[in-house]
Structures are given as C-alpha cells and as structure tokens.
Image (tube, helix red, strand yellow):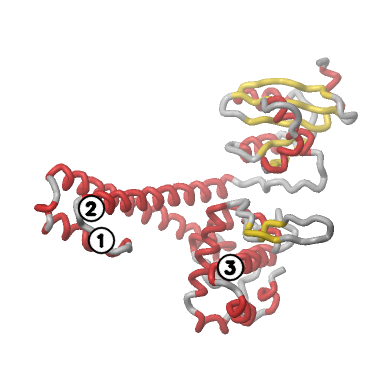
C-alpha cells in the first residue's frame, strides 16, 4: 500500500498475540488500506507512522497496556469484549479475520466497550487473582489431606476448623493406623497448608491496606455485607463505574440477571446469565448470603421492606441472587454519586 493510502485511515483492528500483532485498517469508504503483521516491540514505531484514528482492541491480556500506550500517542483506543467481536467475524478463524472483525466492531457507536484500567487498578486486580489462586490451592490441599486420611480409615468433620484442630492430634496419637510414608506425606501437606495460610494473610493484609487508603473503597464499605475484599475488587474491576449508564447495567454485566429468550412479544426468562466477572459475582452472592443469615438486621436497611417481602415469595437461593443484584446496583450508585450509603435513604433502596 502506498503511504498516501493511510491519509483516509478511519479504524484499525489489532489482534493482540504474545509476540506478534496483526493489524488491519479501513479508510472512510470501507476499503482495506492496511494489512500488516508486526512484532510486539515494533508497536510504537509502527503506529507513529500512521494517522491518528480509532483503534479497536479485543479485551485480553495486555489490552489495557496497549490501550494506554496508543492513547498517549494520540489515538482513540476502544477495548471491546470478545463476545461483541464474534458477530463480525467472517470466514474461518485466523488472525487477520479477527483483526478485521475488531476494526468493524470498533466503529459501532452503540457498542459497549471496556473501560481502560489504570496501572493501580491492574495491580489491585492482580492481588485479588493471586489471593483467589491461593485460596483455591489451600482448598485442594485440605481435600487431599482428607482423602488420604479416609484411605487410612480416619474421617474428620466437614469444616476447616475441625481439620485444622484435629490434624496434629491424629498425626501424634494415631500413627499406628498409617504407614510411615503416608505420615510423612500428610506432614508435608500440612506444612504446605501452613505456608499457604501465611501467603493468604499477607495478601489479604495488603488488600485491606488499599481499602483503608482508597476513598471509593471506604464509601463502598458503608454498604451492608461489603468489606475490604469486595470493595477493592469492585474498584479494581470498574473504577468509579462510569462505563455503565444505570445501576441495573452493572449487575447485568456481572451475570446476576435472568437469561432472556423472547420472541413475538412473549418474554421468556430463565436462569441467570453468569456473564462477566465470575469472581465478583461470587463475592456479591456471598455478601447477600451473610445478610440473609441475620433477619433481625433487615429492618435497619433501606432495602429492608423489599427484602422482607421478597423472602416470603422467593426460594432461598433465588433470594440470595436477587439480593446480590440489589447490592451490586447500590454499589454502582455509591460509586456514581460519590456519597456514602445511607441505610434509610430511599435513593439507595431503589438504586436504579
């Protein structure tokens, strides 16, 4: 392509890979004027030669870093969820077809894009992902210890506290019921468990430190059921919530709304969609379950009358999801308004 062909460049789709990027660009008439494969290290040098325009990126690893880099150069990057890029794919799956679909999707004015995360948000998100992995690894270690003990005919009650308090006594007093090799294996797993516990405590302490210094987290923690973990996870994921026009859009992104399959004017609602952040959805449902365990506190909340009425007509798990949806809407309202949650104010009772 001649260099002058780039003068009318309107949009560029970038298919991000680990080492190689595929670029594909269209001019104002929809003609293909750019088709190029570059190394990751050539990103800045390549875009310096191109006119400033819209650049579409699929939401994936390093998309936020690339977006910030291009924005500093004067481009208009748009990070697009993969589910919204898929309908624009034509032909078979390859990198250039993906880049073409991204370039076309980036031009749609009503398409929802992902908010660009700051480095602080990415750091906080990384802390949560490390903690989540450690918790999962701890659970796997405990389950393996239980399985080995059952193989030796030794059972322990179903709780973390029961296993924690009884494991050492089992190893000390019932060593005649297991072989020396099995005892060494379980001792090793116990040491792994202790080490993971320390790592989880360190990571949790760091997250709690962020929650104490971040004003948005402090406001979110005024909401019932929301503490340092949920507040920092929300801020890491959505910042101040500016990506959503209304409170109901945030729980919809979390997948806390019914799946809809409607046609001919007939609305059919099914199970929740479970789209978006699985981690955040889990945290909000857990917060809802904690609130539901204490019915005597419901009258204190602005949404108390709604919760009491819903409890009479909804099954327990369905009520938990509905309350999680309510908490997510309130969280967006708190972030958007910049005000603390008022336990009696009607604004937060509806949180539309």
* Callout 2: SS: helix
Kindly identify which numbered label has been placed on residue 329: none
Q: Is residue 251 visible?
A: no
Residue placed under numbered mark 1 in the picture: 156
* Callout 1: SS: loop
- Percent coordinates x, y for residue 25 in the rendering: 78, 27
Depth check, front residue: 179 or 290: 179
State yes or no: discs 2 and 1 in contact (Cβ < 8 Å): yes
Crowd rating for badge 2 (residues with CA inside 10 Å; few <14, some 14–19, many 20+): many
Kindly identify which numbered label has been placed on residue 318: 3
Q: Residue at x 65, y 63 (%)?
A: 332
Q: Residue furthest top?
A: 2
Q: Residue at x 23, y 50 (%)?
A: 151
* Callout 3: SS: helix
Q: Which residue is drawn at 63% across and 31% down?
A: 16
Quadrant (top left, top right, bottom left, bottom right) of the N terminus: top right
Q: Can residue 189 be seen in this view?
A: yes
> Could you tell whether 285 is left or right of 192 in the image?
right
Residue placed under numbered mark 2 in the picture: 149
């Amino acid at each position: 392509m001649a260099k002058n062909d780039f003068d009318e460049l309107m949009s560029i789709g970038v298919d991000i890979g680990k080492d190689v990027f595929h670029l594909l660009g269209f001019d104002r008439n929809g003609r293909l004027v750019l088709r190029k494969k570059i190394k990751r290290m050539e990103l800045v040098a390549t875009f310096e030669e191109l006119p400033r325009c819209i650049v579409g990126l699929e939401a994936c690893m390093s998309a936020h870093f690339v977006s910030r880099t291009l924005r500093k150069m004067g481009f208009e990057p748009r990070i697009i969820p993969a589910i919204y890029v898929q309908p624009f794919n034509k032909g078979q799956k390859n990198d250039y077809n993906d880049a073409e679909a991204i370039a076309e999707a980036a031009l749609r004015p009503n398409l929802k894009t992902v908010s660009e995360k700051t480095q602080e948000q990415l750091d906080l998100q990384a802390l949560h992902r490390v903690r989540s992995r450690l918790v999962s690894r701890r659970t796997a270690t405990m389950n393996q210890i239980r399985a080995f003990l059952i193989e030796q005919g030794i059972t322990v009650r179903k709780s973390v506290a029961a296993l924690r308090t009884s494991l050492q006594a089992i190893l000390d007093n019932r060593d005649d019921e297991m072989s020396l090799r099995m005892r060494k294996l379980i001792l090793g797993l116990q040491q792994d468990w202790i080490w993971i516990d320390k790592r989880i405590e360190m990571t949790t302490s760091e997250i709690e430190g962020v929650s104490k210094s971040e004003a948005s987290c402090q406001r979110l923690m005024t909401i019932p059921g929301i503490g340092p973990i949920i507040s920092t996870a929300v801020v890491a994921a959505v910042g101040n919530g500016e990506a959503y026009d209304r409170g109901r859009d945030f729980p919809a992104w979390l997948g806390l709304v019914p799946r809809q399959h409607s046609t001919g004017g007939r609305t059919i609602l099914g199970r929740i969609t479970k789209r978006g952040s699985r981690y955040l959805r889990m945290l909000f449902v857990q917060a809802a379950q904690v609130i539901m365990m204490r019915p005597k506190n419901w009258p204190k909340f602005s949404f108390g009358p709604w919760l009491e009425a819903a409890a009479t007509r909804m099954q327990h798990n369905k009520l938990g999801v509905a309350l999680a949806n309510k908490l997510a809407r309130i969280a967006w309202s708190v972030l958007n308004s910049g005000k603390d949650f008022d336990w009696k104010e009607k604004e937060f009772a509806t949180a539309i």
